[in-house]
Image (cartoon, grey):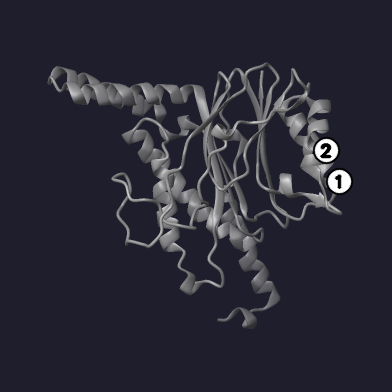
C-alpha cells in the first residue's frame, strides 16, 4: 500500500510506532555515570516533535561489562607471563591499564545530521548502532575508545548511504570526547562546533588555541584513508585524513565546558547572534549554579531570545 492510499488514522499509527522505536536511542538519566569532581547535565531538544537530526549518547563504561573485561585482561597477563610471552604480556598490561582508566571517566557523543526533521533520526539510529558496537570491540581490543572506530564508521556510512537511492546524500557532524575526574577532556571532531570553556575565575569564555581545535570532515562526506584497523573498501579518488585527538583541561574549580550542536552558535534574531551577544553574560550570571541550573538558564534565555528553529543538543560540564 502506498502512503497516499493510507487513511490518516493509519498514518498516525505508523508515525507513532516509528517515533516510539526511534526514541530508544535517546539518553536515559538512569544510566548516566557519576564522577566525584565533575557535575554535568545533558539534553537533546528537537525543533519539532520528539525526534530530529540531533542525538546524544552518554557512554557509561560500566555498561560494557567493564569489570569482567578487566578481569579477563588480567588473566591474559598472567597466562602470557607464565608462558614467557613478554610481548603479549606487555600488550595485555597496557589493555588492563586503559580499562582501569575508564573507571574514572565517561564518554559523550553528539551527532548532528544535516536536517532536523523526524526522518533524519534514521541516520542517527544507524550511527548509534555502529558506535555502540564499535565501543564494545574497542574496549576488548585496546582497552579504550580510539579514533579507529570513527574511521571505520565514516567509511561504512559513506558506502552505505548511496546517492542513487536518495533525494540528497546526507552527512553528519559529530564530536566524541571523554571527561575524566581530574577535568581533562580528550576529544575528536568531524566538522562539529568547537567546545566552549568558561573560566569562573576570569568570568569570561576562554580563547582556545588552534592546537586543540583540530577537526576532520563530517561522517559520510569522504571515505577514510585506508589503515589496517578498518575493513578495506573499494578505492575512491579522494579520501579524508585521520581524526586528530585534542585535549582541554578545566583548571579551576567552577570552570564550565560546553558541548553543543550548531543551534547554539547559529541561533539568531534579526541577524543578532545569541552566542556572540548573550552567552558569556549568561554564564557569568549563572556560574555559581549547578550544571543543570546553568544548562536550564541557557536554554530558557535562548527560547526567550527567539523560538528554536533547529534541534539543540547541550551538555554543560562543571568542575567541582
Q: Is residue 67 visible?
A: yes
Give the image location of residue 319, x and y in percent. Answer: 65, 21
Q: Quarter of the image holding residue 149? A: top left
Q: Locate residue 77 relative to residue 270 in the image: left or right.
A: left
Badge 1: few (under 14), some or many (20 or more) residues near its Cα, within 10 Å? some
- Distance CA(mark 1)–CA(mark 2): 9 Å
Residue drawn at point x = 60 percent, y = 48 percent? 55
**Which of the numbered marks, if any, corresponds to residue 242?**
none
| Outermost residue, front side | 210
Residue that carries the numbered disc 2 in the rendered image: 278
Q: Of helix, strand and loop, which one carries label 1?
A: helix
Residue drawn at point x = 84 percent, y = 27 percent? 285
Instruction: Classify 68 as above or below 216.
Output: above
Instruction: Classify 37 as above or below 242.
Output: above
Residue drawn at point x = 22 percent, y = 22 percent? 89
Can you say which quadrant of the picture contains the C terminus? top right
Q: Nearer the viewer, residue 173 or 236?
A: 236
Badge 2: few (under 14), some or many (20 or more) residues near its Cα, within 10 Å? some
Give the number of callouts: 2
Q: Quarter of the image holding residue 295? A: top right
Residue that carries the numbered disc 1 in the rendered image: 305
Instruction: Classify 28 as above or below 163.
Output: above
Q: Are marks 1 and 2 in contact (CB under 8 Å)?
A: yes
Q: Locate residue 58 relative to residue 228 in the image: left or right.
A: right
Q: Of helix, strand and loop, which one carries label 2?
A: helix
| Outermost residue, left side | 83
Give the image location of residue 189, x and y in percent. Answer: 53, 42
Instruction: Classify 58 as above or below 201.
Output: below
Can you say which quadrant of the picture contains the N terminus? bottom right
Give the image location of residue 258, x and y in percent. Answer: 67, 34
Amino acid at each position: 500500500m502506498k502512503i497516499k492510499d493510507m487513511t490518516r488514522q493509519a498514518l498516525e499509527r505508523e508515525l507513532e510506532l516509528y517515533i516510539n522505536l526511534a526514541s530508544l536511542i535517546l539518553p536515559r538519566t538512569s544510566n548516566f555515570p557519576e564522577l566525584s569532581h565533575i557535575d554535568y547535565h545533558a539534553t537533546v531538544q528537537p525543533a519539532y516533535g520528539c525526534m530530529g537530526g540531533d542525538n546524544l549518547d552518554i557512554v557509561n563504561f560500566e555498561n560494557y561489562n567493564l569489570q569482567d573485561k578487566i578481569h579477563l585482561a588480567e588473566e591474559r597477563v598472567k597466562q602470557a607471563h607464565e608462558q614467557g610471552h613478554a610481548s603479549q604480556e606487555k600488550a595485555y598490561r597496557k589493555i588492563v591499564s586503559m580499562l582501569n582508566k575508564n573507571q574514572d571517566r565517561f564518554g559523550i557523543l553528539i551527532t548532528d545530521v544535516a536536517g532536523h526533521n523526524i526522518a533524519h533520526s534514521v541516520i542517527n539510529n544507524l550511527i548509534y548502532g555502529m558506535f555502540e558496537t564499535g565501543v564494545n570491540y574497542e574496549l576488548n581490543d585496546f582497552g579504550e575508545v580510539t579514533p579507529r572506530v570513527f574511521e571505520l564508521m565514516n567509511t561504512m556510512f559513506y558506502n552505505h548511504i548511496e546517492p542513487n537511492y536518495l533525494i540528497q546524500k546526507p552527512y553528519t557532524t559529530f564530536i566524541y570526547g571523554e571527561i575524566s575526574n581530574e577535568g581533562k577532556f580528550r576529544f575528536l571532531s568531524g566538522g562539529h562546533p568547537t567546545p566552549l570553556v568558561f573560566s569562573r575565575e576570569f568570568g569570561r569564555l576562554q580563547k582556545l588555541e588552534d592546537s586543540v581545535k583540530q577537526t576532520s570532515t563530517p561522517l559520510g562526506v569522504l571515505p577514510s584513508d585506508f589503515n589496517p584497523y578498518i575493513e578495506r573498501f573499494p578505492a575512491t579518488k579522494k579520501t579524508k585524513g585521520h581524526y586528530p585527538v585534542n585535549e582541554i583541561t578545566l583548571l579551576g574549580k567552577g570552570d564550565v565546558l560546553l558541548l553543543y550542536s550548531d543551534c547554539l552558535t547559529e541561533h539568531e534574531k534579526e541577524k543578532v547572534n545569541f552566542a556572540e551577544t548573550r552567552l558569556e553574560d549568561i554564564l557569568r550570571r549563572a556560574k555559581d549554579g549547578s550544571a543543570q541550573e546553568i544548562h536550564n538558564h541557557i536554554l530558557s534565555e535562548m527560547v526567550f531570545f527567539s523560538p528554536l528553529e533547529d534541534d539543540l543538543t547541550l551538555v554543560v560540564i562543571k568542575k567541582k
